[in-house]
Amino acid sequence: MEYKIVMDLFHALILGIVEGITEFLPVSSTGHLIITAKLLGLPQTEFLKTFDISIQLGAILSVVVLYWRSLLVDLDVIKRVAAAFIPTAVLGFGLYKIVKSVLLGNVYVVLWSLLLGGVVLIAFEMLHKEKADAVSDIKKMSLAQAALIGCFQAVAMIPGVSRSAATIIGGLFLGISRKTIVEFSFLLACPTMAAATGLDLLKSAHDFSADQFSFLAVGFISSFVVGILSIRFLLYFVRNHNFISFGVYRIIAAILLFKLL
């Protein structure tokens, strides 16, 4: 009889830390959660899929804590976040069943996305030159630019692509400055992940046990704490660096994991 590892609080803590570290970096938090679960020997159950989606709210709460004024008070910023969220919301709702049943949990989809995403990230950074007139304030972005950034973000429904990477590349391509698009990516994560989590919990929460809700709580709290540190690191990093190193990391990680898994 095959022995299957059952998720416990330690696993929830590890997954929460991985989520907090990777949510805002251009490396794919969902992809890393799927790979981490595989390395921990956790089976891809419906609960684990929901867990991976739901604990992203912890990392998102870290954005709310750090940027509450922009999210809740600044109407110009709110309009642009809303414009970027709409394309993702429409596509996400329409493709929810396909993403969760076919793509989410598929390790090989994740690994190929990590690998190809790394190549794209390196190639883009080598070709991209930020112009002197790049948009340096979220409030100066046009609503059309914001909506197009939302379309780029929607590509990240494929596990392993990275919501952060897709959003940042889209913004840089559209003429947004690096620091500005990184901050906009933080803000756009809030409605995007809140909607994804809400939709999934609405469909799945009634099947959870009390223990499973405690796992969600541990994952949520750990991703929140680590998420704050991750945001501060990325803001410091982009002052003097591009994202080529993350592209190299993605390629190396994908190759090693292809051999390991």
Image (cartoon, rainbow, N blue to C red):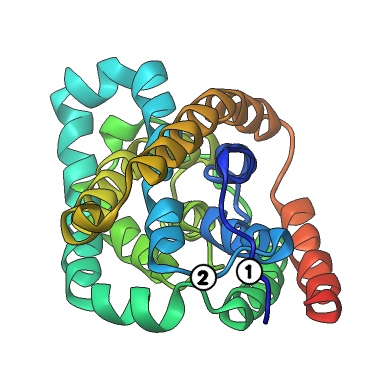
- Which residue was labeled with disc 1? 4
Residue type marked 1: Lys
Marks 2 and 1 in Cβ contact (< 8 Å):
no
Q: Residues within 10 Å of mark 1 (few under 14, many from 20)?
A: few
* Image position of 8 with respect to 160: above or below: above
Left or right, 150 with reference to 203: right
Q: In terms of depth relative to the viewer, which is nearer, 81 or 57?
A: 57
Residue 74 lies, in percent from the top left, at 19, 21
Residue type marked 2: Gln
Residue 159 lies, in percent from the top left, at 50, 69
Left or right, 93 with reference to 214: left
Residue 177 lies, in percent from the top left, at 50, 41
Task: Give residue 183's mark.
Answer: none
Residue 115 figure quarter: bottom right
Question: Could you tell me which secondary element the residue under label 2 belongs to?
Answer: loop
Direction front: furthest residue = 1
Answer whether residue 135 is visible to the viewer in this image: no
Task: Give residue 44's mark.
Answer: 2
Q: Residue at (23%, 52%) from the top-left corner? A: 205
* Image position of 18 with respect to 98: above or below: above
Query: For the residues marked 2 and 1, what is the alpha-carbon distance in whole angstroms?
Result: 11 Å
Q: In terms of depth relative to the viewer, which is nearer, 39 or 121?
A: 39
